[in-house]
Amino acid sequence: MVDPSSEEYSADYAYFRARLAKQGPLSYEWWASRFTACLVRRYRQGGRLLEIGCGLGRTLQLLEDDFETHGIDISAYAVELARQAAPRSQIAQMDARDLAATDAIPFEEASLDVVLAAHVFEHLDDPGDTVAQCARLLKPGGLLLFLVPNTGCVSRRWKGRDWFGFRDAGHVSLLSPDRWLELVRAGGLRVTRVFGDALWDAPYVPLIPTSIQRVVFLLPALVQFQLGMPLIPPKWGEDLGVVARK
C-alpha cells in the first residue's frame, strides 16, 4: 500500500530538484552517494541489500556490481528515475511503513544482509517500528546503516530555526542522537559506529563569503570521503550516521 501523501514526493519535491540540479564531482550529493556506497562495502562484502527510500537510485547504481540490490521508495517519480539509473536493481514503489506487512514485500524474515536508509526515518511518525522491521528482515550479523538530521549538531545551535532540519515539513521525527540509538537497541540491534557527515550547509558565520566557508567546513568531509571511513564526530555533522548489527 502506498500512502496518498506520496503525491507530495513528485518531480516538484525540493529534495529531488536539488539532487537533479547538483550532479557531478563538484557537488556534495555526488560525493555523499559514493561515501555511502563505500561505507556499505567497508562493513559488508556482498549479499542481498535493500535501500529504503532509494530516491533517484544513485547509491544503488554504485552497489549493483557487489550486491543483489533492491530498492523501495514512496515516490513513483523517484522509482521511475531509479530504475533508469540502476537497471539491474529490483525497485518498487512502496511506503517504508509497509515493511511490517509481510504480504506486501518480497522479503522473508532474516533474508537481507544489508538495509540502507538515508534520509528516511525522520519522515516517519513511528521510526522505531520501521527500525524494528529492518531488524526483523536482517540475517544474524546483518547490517543496518542509516542517516538522519542530527539535532545534536553544533550547527543547530548556530542557526536556530534556520537549521536545515526544520526546513522540510516532512521531517516529523527530529529526535536526539541518544533517542535514535535507543530505538536501534530496542529493535534488537547492536550499535557499532556513530558519526557525523559534514557541515555542508554554509554560511555559518557572518561577514565571511559563503564560498570560502564551504571550502573550509567541507575539508573534513572530503578527507572522510576519500578514506571511506566514518571519522567525523557526530556533533560536527549536519546528519547523524549510525551503523548497527543484528
Image (cartoon, rainbow, N blue to C red):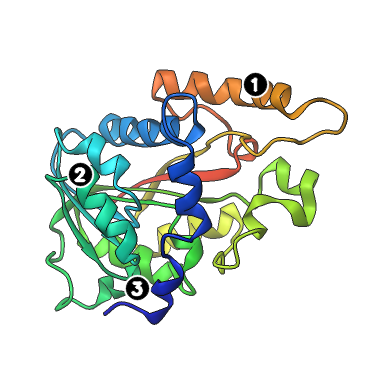
Quarter of the rendering containing residue 237: top right
Query: Which residue is identified by label 3?
Result: 97
Instruction: Give yes or no for contact between labels 3 and 1 (Cβ–Cβ under 8 Å).
Output: no
**Most foreground residue, 188 or 105:** 105
Q: CA distance from mark 3 to mark 2?
A: 23 Å
Residue 122 x/y as whole percent = 51, 62
Quarter of the rendering containing residue 68: top left
Single out the mark in the foreground, 3 or 2: 2
Write the residue at 34% across / 33% down: 39
Query: Which residue is identified by label 2?
Result: 86
At label 3, the amino acid type is: Arg
Query: Which residue is identified by label 1?
Result: 215
> Position of 197 compared to 37: left or right?
right
Residue 42 x/y as whole percent = 29, 29
Circle 2: is it few (<14), some (14-19), or many (20+) Cα within 10 Å?
Answer: many
Going from the N terminus, do you reach mark 3 or mark 1 first?
A: 3
**Most foreground residue, 92 or 99:** 92
Q: CA distance from mark 3 to mark 1?
A: 38 Å
At label 2, the amino acid type is: Ala
Going from the N terminus, do you reach mark 1 or mark 2 first?
A: 2
Write the residue at 61% across / 57% down: 176
Q: CA distance from mark 1 to mark 2?
A: 31 Å
> Position of 52 compared to 180: left or right?
left
Q: Classify mark 3: helix, strand or loop.
A: helix
